[in-house]
Image: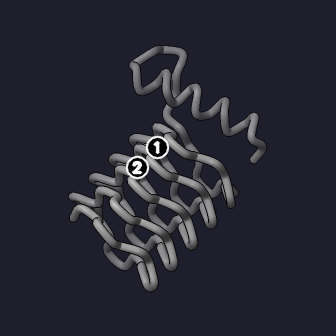
Amino acid sequence: MTELQLKKILKHHAEWLKNNAEGCRADLRDANLRSADLRNADLRFADLRDTNLRNADLRNADLRSADLRYADLRFADLRNANLRSADLRDADLRNANLQNSDLQFADLQNANSRNANLQGVVK
């Protein structure tokens, strides 16, 4: 996925979050967002199932209620990310940096968080 395509999806998603008729929910299923710069992105309720987010920069991203089932988040930087109520079932979080992120009510069933930095995580 190109940076331009991603920006367009994020723009439409922002409009959808505002209940604007021109917007639509971000559908990033199976997308390759490896090493993507998603700092401060508003991805609330986004569909990120099976998405490759390996090495992605998701610092301060708002991922509340996002669907991240089976997502590859290895080595992703999720510092200060809001993952409240996110669906992380079967996600791969190995070596991810989740320092100071909010994981309250997140579903981490079968998620692999081996070697992840969980310092200061709100559970």
- Mark 2 vs 1: CB contact within 8 A: yes
Residue annotated with mark 1: 46
**Residue at horizontal 41%, vertical 27%?**
17
Q: Can the viewer see residue 38 in this picture?
A: yes
Return the residue found at the far top: 21
**Residue at horizontal 49%, vertical 48%?**
47
**Residue at horizontal 49%, vertical 21%?**
15
Which secondary structure lies at badge 1?
Answer: loop
Residue annotated with mark 2: 66
Give the amino acid at mark 2.
Ala
Return the residue found at the far bottom: 114
What percent of the width, then of the height, locates residue 51?
59, 59
Horizontal side of 93 relative to 89 (left or right) equals right
| Disc 2/disc 1 C-alpha distance (Å) | 5 Å
Establish if 77 lies above or below 39: below
Q: Residues within 10 Å of mark 1 (few under 14, many from 20)?
A: many
Q: Residues within 10 Å of mark 2 (few under 14, many from 20)?
A: many
What percent of the width, then of the height, locates residue 120?
28, 66
